[in-house]
Image (tube, rainbow, N blue to C red):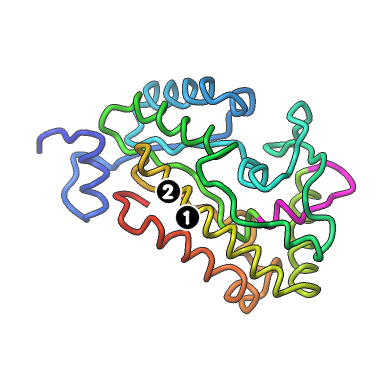
């Protein structure tokens, strides 16, 4: 059969149609570049072209969603892919009222919408996906307070924090998740307007045995995941 374009190859795979070959892509964190959108766009595009990937999944820094709601980090001190947390808006379950709707095209979101635009300009007709963490994943970053900066302890602090907040202020958790989900849905739609074909929606280290019960995820996870996904339901490639 005739050779397909990158976009045609992915589209055909999504439809279950005949392919000239299986579409391929891969991604990683670029810690040295992830705080500068020009640098991150350039290194992402270099890997895309050097390895001839069929689509480009943007891999932004893991903390930018939590930064949008006020977390501050020391980017000179990483353990694995996580910088050291300096401070954030949540120090107790009573603080959940601080997690309000925010501008989905301002601040750190504006930087990453510009990243979408820069990347899209460099991939030809290929699909681009912007990464978005689930609302519960974002809340996990906001509630985590680890005594020592080490990625396994940071992740455990997310899990411990979520369980504590569920128990002590479930109503506040729901209100915060609603605001996060609404904002992320609007941000996802804005990313598509800037050229993304859809979202890479990541549930980060939560939907696994031993972290939350199925009942907890059904209550605090799934409804807000669906809210974000429904906001980008018409996208070409989620």
Report helix, strand or loop for mark 1.
helix
Query: Where is residue 230, by image quadrant?
Result: bottom left
Is 147 part of what is drawn in magenta? yes
Depicted 192 relative to depicted 161: above or below: above
Mark 2 lies on a secondary structure that is strand
Q: Earlier in the sequence, mark 2 or mark 1?
A: 1
From the viewer's side, name the closer residue of 100 and 115: 100
Left or right: 48 with respect to 126?
A: right
Q: Residue at x 53, y 69 (%)?
A: 222
Vertically, is 36 above or below 6?
above
Q: Are marks 2 and 1 in contact (CB under 8 Å)?
A: no
> Front-most of 236 and 192?
192
Residue at 23% from the left image edge and 47% from the top image edge: 11
Which residue is disc 2 drawn over? 199
Query: For mark 1, what is the residue?
Result: 185
Task: Give the number of the mark in front: 2 or 1.
Answer: 1
Classify 154 as above or below 194: below
Residue sticking out furthest to the left: 1
Q: Is residue 142 above or below residue 112?
A: below
Query: In x, y percent, where is residue 196?
Result: 37, 40
Q: Residue furthest right?
A: 147
Across and down, in percent, residue 120 comes to 36, 30
Q: Is residue 18 magenta?
A: no
């Amino acid at each position: 059969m005739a050779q397909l374009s990158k976009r045609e190859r992915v589209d055909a795979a999504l439809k279950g149609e005949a392919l000239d070959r299986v579409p391929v892509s891969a991604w990683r964190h670029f810690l040295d570049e992830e705080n500068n959108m020009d640098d991150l766009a350039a290194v992402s595009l270099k890997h895309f072209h050097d390895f001839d990937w069929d689509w480009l999944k943007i891999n932004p820094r893991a903390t930018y969603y939590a930064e949008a709601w006020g977390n501050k980090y020391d980017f000179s001190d990483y353990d694995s892919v996580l910088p050291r947390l300096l401070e954030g808006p949540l120090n107790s379950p009573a603080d959940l009222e601080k997690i309000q709707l925010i501008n989905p095209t301002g601040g750190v979101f504006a930087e990453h919408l510009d990243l979408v635009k820069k990347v899209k300009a460099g991939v030809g007709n290929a699909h681009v996906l912007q990464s978005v963490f689930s609302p519960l994943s974002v809340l996990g970053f906001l509630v985590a307070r680890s005594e020592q900066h080490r990625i396994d302890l940071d992740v455990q602090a997310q899990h411990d924090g979520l369980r504590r907040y569920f128990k002590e202020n479930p109503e506040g958790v729901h209100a915060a998740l609603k605001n996060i989900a609404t904002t992320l849905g609007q941000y996802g739609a804005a990313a598509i307007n800037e050229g993304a074909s859809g979202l890479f929606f990541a549930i980060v280290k939560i939907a696994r045995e031993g972290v939350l019960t199925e009942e907890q995820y059904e209550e605090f996870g799934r409804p807000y995941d669906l809210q974000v996904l429904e906001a980008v339901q018409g996208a070409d490639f989620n």
